[in-house]
Every structure is written in C-alpha cells, then in structure tokens.
Image: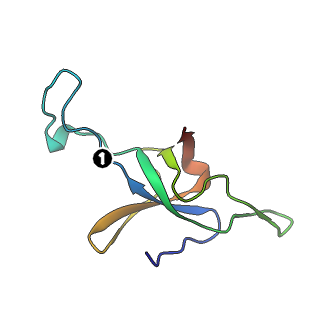
Amino acid sequence: MNLKPLYDRVVVKPIEADEVSAGGIVIPDNAKEKPTKGEVVAVGEGKALDNGQLRAPKVKVGDKVIYGQYSGSAYKLEGVEYKIVREDDILAVLA
C-alpha cells in the first residue's frame, strides 16, 4: 500500500462485525452497526506539539484498535475501504 498518513493520522482497515448474532440470528446489512474495530495498516510520524517537536505515535502497524464510531474519513483504495483517523480518536488497543 502506498498510502502514507500525515502527522498524527492513522490508516485503519475496518474489521467487519459478525453477520450472525450469538443466538444464531442472521443480522441484515441495514441493521449492522458501523465497524469500530480495525487493524492499523499505516501510521504518520507523530503529533506536532506547540514547541515544534513531534510526539511519537503510541500505535504501530499491525495493532488491533477500537476507534470512535463516527470518527475519521473513509477512503477506498483498490477496492478495499480504509478509515483515516487521528490518533486521538483511537480509544483502545486490543491486547
């Protein structure tokens, strides 16, 4: 992939939610929630601080993360949809 995010932005490949509920019921497309989990595929160089320095990002490529449901911008590249979010919009890293 030749998509390089700037500063504190992170490119995330969303992980789709299960299509079947825990009880075995098939969930239709229009009832599914937007994905909020994803895998980090690219990371910018860091957040620009007031003193001109860059703070290194806390996430790295390959991390599985949870991000805000309505955060970021969607971008489609070669048929694959990605989300570009600010590092501040990432809520947690899945261990």
> In the rendered image, which residue does mark 1 sit on?
16
Instruction: Identify the residue shown where x is 55% and y is 59%.
Output: 61
Q: Secondary structure at mark 1?
A: loop
Q: How many marks overall?
A: 1
Residue 46 versus residue 95 in the image, above or below: below
**Horizontal and vertical percent position of residue 31:** 19, 37
Name the residue furthest top. Answer: 23
From what the image shows, is residue 81 above or below residue 20? below
Residue depicted at x 45% and y 53%: 39
Q: Quadrant of residue 80?
A: bottom left
The x and y percentages for residue 38 are 42, 50
Say whether residue 35 is left or right of residue 66: left
Left or right: residue 3 versus residue 59 is: left
Q: Residue furthest bottom?
A: 2
Quadrant of the frame with the N terminus: bottom left
The residue nearer to you, when weighing 57 against 86, is 57
Q: Residue at the far right: name it.
A: 51
